Amino acid sequence: MGLRGKVAIITGASKGIGKAIAEHYGREGAKLIISARHGEMLHKTNDELKSNGVESMAVIADMAREDDVKKLVKTAADTFGRIDVLVNNAGFGVFKPVSEMTTGEYDELFDVNMRGTFIATREVLKYMTGQNDGVIINIASLAGKNAVENGAAYAATKWAMLGFGKSLMLEVRKYNIRVITICPGSVDTDFSFGHSPNRDRVLKPEDVAEAAVLAASLPARAMMSEIDLRPTNPK
C-alpha cells in the first residue's frame, strides 16, 4: 500500500528513533503529525521536515497526560480528516536496582511508556475502525523479551507493550487494522548510550526507521506482528 498520502502520528519524534521514523515516513510521502514533550526540539525537527518538502505539523504532548494525548489525536483527525498510522514511540528509561527505585520513578515509567501508548491507541481506534483500515506500530525493545539487570521496571513496561500489542492485534484485525511491535536491541541514541565501546557496531535509529517503513508498507493483506531487530555483530 505504501505510505504516500497516508496520515501518520509519531510520538517521541523530536530526536532519536522517533525523529528517524519521521524523516523516513516523510521521504515516503506521508503526512505527519509529530509530538514530543519538549517544544524547542520538536519544532526544530518539524522545521527540518518541512524544509525537505514534508507536510508536517508539530503538537507538543506529554504522553503521561491524558488530555495531551487526546488533543494530539483530535488535532490530527481534524487537520487531515483521517488517521492511517500511529507510531507509539515515546518512552524513556530509569536504570537502577529495584531496591533504589522510587515509586514516583516507577509510576512515571508506566505512565509514559505504557499508559500513554494505551490512550493514544484507544483514541486512534475511534477513527481507524470507522475507516476499516489502519496500522499501529509499537516501538518496544528486546528488553521486553529478556531480563535486564538494573532495568526491571523499564523491562516490565516493554513486556507489557508486547502483551498489549499481541492482544490488540486479535481484537482489531477484523477491521483490517494491523498491529506491529518492533523490538530493537541496542540502538545508538542518547537514550541507550553514554559511553559504549561498541557504539559503531550497534543499530542506528535509521535501521529502526526502515523496519517501521516496511511494517506500514506491506500489502494490506499481509502483516508482520512482531519484528526483532538486533545488530548483526555488535562485538
Image (tube, helix red, strand yellow):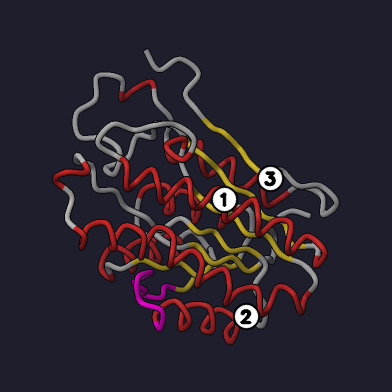
Toward the viewer: 2 or 161?
161
Q: Residue at x 70, y 56 (%)?
A: 169
Q: Amino acid at mark 1?
A: Gly
Residue 199 occupies quadrant: top left
Q: Quadrant of the C terminus?
A: top left
Q: Marks 2/3: CA distance?
A: 27 Å
Question: Where are the magenta residues, as a range?
Answer: 58-67
Q: Residues within 10 Å of mark 3 (few under 14, many from 20)?
A: some
Looking at the rendered structure, the kind of residue marked 2 is: Phe
Residue at left 80%, top 67%? 175
**In front here: 126 or 24?**
126
Residue topped by disc 2 = 80
Label 3 belongs to which residue? 225
Q: Quadrant of the N terminus?
A: bottom right
Reply yes or no: does residue 92 show up in magenta: no
Q: Which mark is residue 122?
A: none
> How far separated are the C-alphas under marks 1 and 3?
12 Å
Q: Quadrant of residue 44?
A: bottom left
Q: CA distance from mark 2 to mark 1?
A: 31 Å
* Mark 2 crowdedness (10 Å alpha carbons): few <14, some 14-19, many ≥20: some
